Each structure stands twice: as structure tokens, then as C-alpha cells.
Image (cartoon, rainbow, N blue to C red):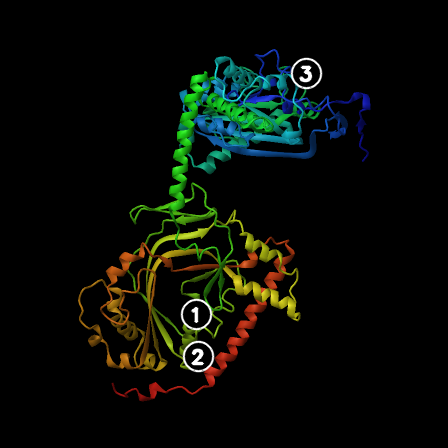
């Protein structure tokens, strides 16, 4: 297939579409560039920059539907191809005018967050410049309507300004700035600041995306919207958008009955295929269309959608813009002048009118008071406690010794990252970015007894959960250096004991890290990972030493989530002969009798041991565990333990009572060369730990053990 490509000659070079938006100011009250203000006759006269006459840059050649167009560009801008077109059937749904206003201007990006709409500014101020807003406001506030927006977005190229400190100002803008003085003291001096804002706007445009945009606004009565769930409602919107595209491809005209202020189309018929929409939806909805570049009423018999595509190819418009405060341009001016211009802009954005000198002074005092209040609030936040558990969640974990290791993530806290414990005198805690807290308070008193006869079975059903780990519990607790684990090895492998495990868990909250986006790695962690080898080689002493050093610091896994609170658990080890002579029910009953003081709130100091069968006492081995709360006052050896006192301290001294673990290598991208190496090294270390532990287990199994069951009375 042979393509015909038309090449425009050098004599046909034109000014790049969108460039004029970068040279003129922007008014954040009207939400338009000054060149878009049709009420002004001097849109092109008052420019911020003189970038097209100072120094010429490279020509930009752009292929638009087979037509090569060449544009002249100044050296102070960078042009990049985009060439992307996307359709979004349901981009947003707005049930209030504030929501619609925000969604309508989503293509406007401010370098500093300003509220949209600006609080206190009358809505009507934008109606004269954005007819769609008027239609939306009346529909939402007077006709109880919800509005959905669907889009066909076609980004062709972007234009980016050079840094502001090297941009040449327009001579008239320079002359205007020369009138500004620091600390104005007269009405005339303040008037110069006001004139800057009224003439050049509040912001400048630092970058734009140029292309085409088709938007469909579907107005649906709330009486219909409220009858259906979100999915069903959005399905109808999506079907309507597709029907509109098909119908527009077959239609040569639009109904412009209600098109005033839209500059585009108006009400639109659902077309011949409207049977795909429910009757209720058709009767309670209408559609408005908007095109950029705009279409005129007479389309000369052309298909509407095709006409828009052809028009956008030849005369693209600005469909996205990034904005920065006009005061930021005064980087080479005295700070007091820059600050006063920003103060004038802030007043204008707050009250939608330009200030008098006295009003600016009052506004400055108000702002200073707000800053002081904010500083006091920040100091209050700094004094707050970091959320308990932050030394566990997000930190590495050694699955062999079951110990927490070095934390992996940046623990920066912003002003809004707090959690208030409503059950603990509304104590406020700081929570790092991309960590979150769930209110999962649960004090249910249960002490169900479970039985285990295998070492790994206990760990798999205890307080540990493995996620995103194909090897699951392989190598878990594979250590013969920690006393707690060694005791369990002896019970299961030397004495072939069974375990009866009883627990009561008190959960105050759940602390977790976000799945997406995950918290940023700390600088130390990034440095440690970046210095890991790209490959794993178990035969290289130096290579292996680096991996072992990393695991010694961070472990093979990290904790993604933990329930915080307190845990009481009891382990009763007994030999299989008791199961043969008696049964699980008898063992469960005796075990719960032994630990009745442990799980019951009581002041009765009577010795419960008198109710426990002597055989059970003689042929079982108990172990108690208490996690969380204040433990130094606790008598874990008998009935003097005060459960109610311990429970009371959990809220102030919570500890992790569950661990959700994930391999550290899952933090790396799949295409990161260190991902496979870290995964291989992790499996190697787990295998090595298992092999070493198996040798220890074999030694236990061959050692002599006391045959306690041989002394069990025959006819007890």
C-alpha cells in the first residue's frame, strides 16, 4: 500500500499552534488565558514573554493524517510528539456543581494547589466565559440532575517553556513591572500591582498539550440515577457515548436548540440505535456535545465526527495546560515586590475583586495569623507520638529466627497523616505516608483449643500469613539458635509431643502499608539494594557474602500488615499415649482448667490446680506467652495474674499479634535485573537454613529421651 504524504515547503511555515498560550497570562477566576477573553480588544497586545522574536529555534515538523506541516519554533521552548488518542466512556460523574466544576477543569494543572472552585467566589463569574458551566449549574441546582462526562482525547504534541529565569520578558510587561515598588504606601503604588493582575492575569502557562477534544455531557435526572447502582448507571452512560459516536459518524447536522454559550453543539438525539438504551434512561436524560477545535453550525454535508477529526488535524487546540503563579516570574526582583504581587493575587483569588491598599494590609495580617496557626498546628503534630507498630510494619523480617530487622521505608509524615484512637482518650498518632490504619478493634474473649502434631502445621496456623510467596512456609522457623524455637523442636522431634494451643487475642487496630503506591524506600535501603550484585552466584565467596550481609540487615521478608493489640496464649505439650489412654476432649478440658486463671477476669485467688487431674499435671508440659500491655506487674506463674489490669494497659502498649509477610524481592520491578538475583539468593538462604536445621532435627531424633509414658498407671 502506497501512502501519499504532502510536504509543505519552507515558505508555508507557520507559528506553532498553542505557542500563544505560553506567551500570555491566565486568569484563575475566569479560568481562561487572556487571549481567550473575547471582551478584550488587546488580547495579543499584552504578552508576558518575547520569545518568538529574540532567537529562533529548530523547526518542528508534524505529520497530521498524512500531511507534513512545518512550524517555526523559538529556542525558548521544547516541543515533543505525543501522538496518543484515548476514549473514556465515563470519565466522571457529578451530583453537585462543585464536583462538576472540578471535573470540568481537570485539564488545568496548578503548580500549587488552589481550591477549584475557589471558596467564596460566586459561581456566576465563570458563566460568561464557559457556557457549559451555566447549563450545568442550572441543571444540577434547579432540575435535580446528575451529569456524566465522556471524552475522546487526542494529544498530538506538547510545548514546554524554558526555565523562567532565562525567558525574555515582553517590553510592555517589563515596563509594567518597573512601576512596582516594595512596600507600597500610596493608592497609585497599589494600583500598579492591580493593573498587573487585571492585564496579565494571576498565572502564566508553563506547558501545554495541543490536539483535539470531544466531550459528551450526559444530563440524567436524579429520580432515575437514584434507582440504580453505580455500575448500572455508568453502563447506560457508556452505551450512550458509543451510540453518539456511531450516530455522529452517520449524521451531517446537530440540533442547536440549546447551544447558547456552548460554542459547539447543544442537545443531541440518541440516534437510530437508541433501542440499546432503556426507555427510562432516554426519557430522563439529554446529551450536550463540545468539540475542540469548535465546529460551526454548517458542516457542508460532511460527517460530524470526521469533520472534527479533519479540523483537529489542521487546526489543533490547547487541551491541557500547566499553570504557575505570575509572582514566580519575578525571581530576579526584590523579594518584597514578589511577595506583594503574590499577596495581591491571593486577595483577588479569595474575594474575586482587586484590593485597595488598606485591604491588602488587613489581608496580610490575616494571612500571617493563619501562618502562625499553621505553625502551631505543625508543632502539635511534631509532638505527637508515632503510631505503635511502625518499628515492625514495613520492616524486614527474619523468617528463620522470627525477629524484626531493619525498616525498609521512608517514614516521612505529612500534616494530614494522623490517626485518632477513639477508644483511648482520642490519643492522636502520626502515620507515615502510604501507611494506613484500620479500626479493627476486637476484644472478643475466646479460648478455643487447637491440636497440632507437626512443627510446620503449628506455624502455618498461628499468627503468621505468607503472601506473594510461592515457597510459602519453606524455611520458616528453620533456626536452632533461638531458645523459643529450640524448645519446640525438642517437643515435636525429640519427644514426639502433641500440642494443645489456646489463645485469646485483643486487637486495637491494624497497621498496614499501601499496596499501591507502596511507601518510598528509605535512602539507606535504596543504597543497599543498588549495591547488590546483578546476579547470584553461590560459588563466589564475595558474591555470597554480599547477599548474606543484606539478609542479616533486612531479612528475606518484610511485614506488610499487622494487627496491633495483645495476645495471651498457652501451649500444652503431651505425648501420644495420653491420646490413646484418654481423648482430645479430656485433654482440652484439662488444659483449659489449668489456664482458667489466665483467661478469666476474676479476683478469686483460689488455686485452680486442685481441679486438674494429677495424671494431666504429671505428663504434660505447659508454656505461657503474653504479648502486649504492661507485663512487669503480671504473675504468669499462677492465679495472681490480673487479667483486667493487663487488658487495661494494652491500649497504651500494643504489640503486633499477627504478621503478614512478603518476600523483599517483590519490592523490585519484574524487569529489574536484581529481581531474579534477589529471588534466587532468598531461595538459597532458605534452602541452606532448612538443610542445617534438618541435621539438628536428626540429632534430636536419635538422642535418648525419657520414656515418661512407660510410667503411666495402667488402670488409672
Toward the viewer: 207 or 102? 207
Q: Are the two marked residues, 3 and 1, in contact with CB atoms closer than 8 angstroms?
A: no
Q: Provide residue 659's location: percent of width, then percent of height.
A: 43, 60
Residues under numbered marks 2 and 1 in contact, where contact means CB atoms less than 8 Å apart? no
Specify the label residue 61 is tagged with.
none
- Residue 656 position in % (x across, y down): 39, 59
Residue at image mark 1:
457
Q: Is residue 600 left or right of residue 453?
A: left
Mark 2 or 1 closer to N-term?
1
- The extreme top residue here reads 41
The residue wearing badge 2 is 493
Local crowd size for mark 1, using a 10 Å CA cut-off: few (<14), some (14–19), many (≥20): few
Q: Is residue 655 left or right of residue 84?
A: left
Q: Is residue 30 visible?
A: yes
Which residue is nearer to you in this view: 466 or 109?
109
Mark 3 → mark 1, Cα distance in angstroms: 78 Å
Snapshot quadrant of residue 73:
top right
Mark 3 to mark 2 CA distance (whole Å): 90 Å
On screen, residue 416 above or below 711 = above
Amino acid at each position: 500500500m502506497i501512502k501519499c504524504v504532502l510536504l509543505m515547503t519552507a515558505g508555508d511555515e507557520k507559528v506553532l499552534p498553542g505557542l500563544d498560550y505560553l506567551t500570555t497570562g491566565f486568569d484563575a477566576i475566569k479560568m481562561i488565558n487572556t487571549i481567550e477573553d473575547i471582551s478584550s480588544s488587546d488580547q495579543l497586545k499584552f504578552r508576558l514573554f518575547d520569545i518568538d522574536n529574540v532567537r529562533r529555534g529548530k523547526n518542528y515538523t508534524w505529520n497530521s493524517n498524512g500531511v507534513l506541516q512545518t512550524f517555526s519554533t523559538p529556542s525558548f521552548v521544547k516541543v515533543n510528539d505525543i501522538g496518543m488518542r484515548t476514549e473514556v466512556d465515563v470519565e466522571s460523574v457529578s451530583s453537585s456543581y462543585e464536583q462538576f466544576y472540578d471535573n470540568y477543569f481537570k485539564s488545568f494543572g496548578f503548580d500549587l494547589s488552589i481550591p477549584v472552585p475557589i471558596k467564596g467566589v460566586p459561581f456566576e463569574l465563570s458563566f460568561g466565559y464557559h457556557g457549559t458551566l451555566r447549563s450545568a449549574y442550572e441543571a444540577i441546582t434547579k432540575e435535580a440532575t446528575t451529569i456524566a462526562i465522556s471524552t475522546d482525547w487526542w494529544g498530538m504534541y506538547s510545548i514546554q517553556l524554558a526555565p523562567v529565569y532565562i525567558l525574555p520578558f515582553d517590553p510592555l510587561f517589563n515596563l509594567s513591572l518597573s512601576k512596582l515598588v516594595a512596600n507600597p504606601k500610596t493608592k497609585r503604588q497599589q494600583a500598579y500591582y492591580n493593573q498587573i493582575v487585571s492585564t496579565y492575569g494571576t498565572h502564566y502557562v508553563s506547558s501545554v498539550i495541543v490536539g483535539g477534544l470531544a466531550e459528551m455531557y450526559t444530563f440524567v435526572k436524579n429520580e432515575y440515577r437514584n434507582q440504580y447502582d453505580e455500575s448500572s448507571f455508568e453502563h447506560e452512560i457508556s452505551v450512550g457515548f458509543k451510540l453518539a459516536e456511531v450516530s455522529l459518524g452517520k449524521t451531517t447536522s446537530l440540533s442547536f436548540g440549546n447551544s447558547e454559550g456552548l460554542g459547539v453543539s447543544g442537545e443531541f438525539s440518541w440516534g437510530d440505535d437508541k433501542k440499546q438504551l432503556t426507555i427510562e434512561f432516554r426519557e430522563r436524560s439529554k446529551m450536550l456535545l463540545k468539540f475542540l477545535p469548535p465546529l460551526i453550525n454548517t458542516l457542508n454535508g460532511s460527517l460530524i465526527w470526521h469533520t472534527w477529526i479533519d479540523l483537529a488535524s489542521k487546526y489543533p487546540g490547547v487541551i491541557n495546560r500547566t499553570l504557575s503563579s505570575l509572582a514566580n516570574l519575578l525571581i530576579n526582583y526584590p523579594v518584597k515586590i514578589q511577595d506583594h504581587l503574590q499577596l495581591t493575587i491571593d486577595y483577588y483569588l479569595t474575594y474575586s475583586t482587586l484590593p485597595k491598599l488598606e485591604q491588602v494590609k488587613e489581608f496580610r495580617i490575616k494571612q500571617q495569623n493563619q501562618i502562625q496557626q499553621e505553625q502551631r498546628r505543625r508543632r502539635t503534630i511534631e509532638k505527637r507520638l508515632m503510631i505503635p507498630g511502625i518499628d515492625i510494619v514495613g520492616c524486614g523480617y527474619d523468617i528463620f529466627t522470627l525477629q524484626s530487622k531493619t525498616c525498609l521505608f521512608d517514614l516521612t509524615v505529612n500534616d494530614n497523616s494522623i490517626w485518632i484512637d477513639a477508644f483511648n482518650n482520642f490519643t492522636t498518632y502520626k502515620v507515615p505516608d502510604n501507611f494506613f490504619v484500620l479500626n479493627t478493634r476486637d476484644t472478643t474473649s475466646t479460648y478455643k483449643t487447637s491440636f497440632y502434631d507437626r512443627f510446620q502445621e503449628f506455624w502455618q496456623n498461628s499468627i503468621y500469613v505468607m503472601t506473594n510467596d510461592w515457597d510459602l512456609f519453606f524455611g520458616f522457623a528453620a533456626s536452632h539458635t533461638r531458645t523459643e524455637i529450640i524448645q519446640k523442636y525438642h517437643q515435636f522431634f525429640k519427644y514426639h509431643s502433641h500440642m494443645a494451643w489456646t489463645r485469646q487475642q485483643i486487637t486495637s487496630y491494624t497497621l498496614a502499608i499501601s499496596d499501591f503506591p507502596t511507601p518510598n524506600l528509605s535512602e539507606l535501603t535504596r543504597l543497599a539494594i543498588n549495591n547488590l550484585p546483578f546476579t547470584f552466584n553461590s560459588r563466589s565467596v564475595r558474591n555470597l557474602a554480599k547477599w548474606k550481609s543484606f539478609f542479616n540487615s533486612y531479612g528475606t521478608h518484610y511485614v506488610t500488615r499487622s494487627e496491633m493489640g495483645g495476645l495471651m496464649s498457652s501451649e500444652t505439650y503431651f505425648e501420644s499415649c495420653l491420646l490413646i489412654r484418654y481423648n482430645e476432649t479430656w485433654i482440652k478440658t484439662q488444659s483449659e482448667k489449668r489456664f482458667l486463671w489466665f483467661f478469666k477476669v476474676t479476683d478469686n485467688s483460689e488455686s485452680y490446680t486442685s481441679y486438674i487431674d494429677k495424671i494431666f499435671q504429671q505428663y504434660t508440659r505447659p508454656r505461657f506467652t503474653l504479648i502486649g500491655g504492661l507485663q512487669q506487674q503480671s504473675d504468669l506463674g499462677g492465679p495472681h495474674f490480673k487479667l483486667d489490669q493487663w487488658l487495661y494497659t494494652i491500649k497504651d502498649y500494643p504489640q503486633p499479634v499477627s504478621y503478614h509477610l512478603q518476600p523483599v524481592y517483590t519490592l523490585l520491578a519484574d524487569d529489574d535485573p536484581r529481581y531474579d538475583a534477589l529471588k534466587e539468593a532468598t531461595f538459597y538462604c532458605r534452602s541452606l537454613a532448612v538443610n542445617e536445621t534438618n541435621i539438628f532435627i536428626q540429632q534430636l531424633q536419635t538422642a535418648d529421651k525419657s520414656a515418661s509414658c512407660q510410667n503411666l498407671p495402667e488402670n488409672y
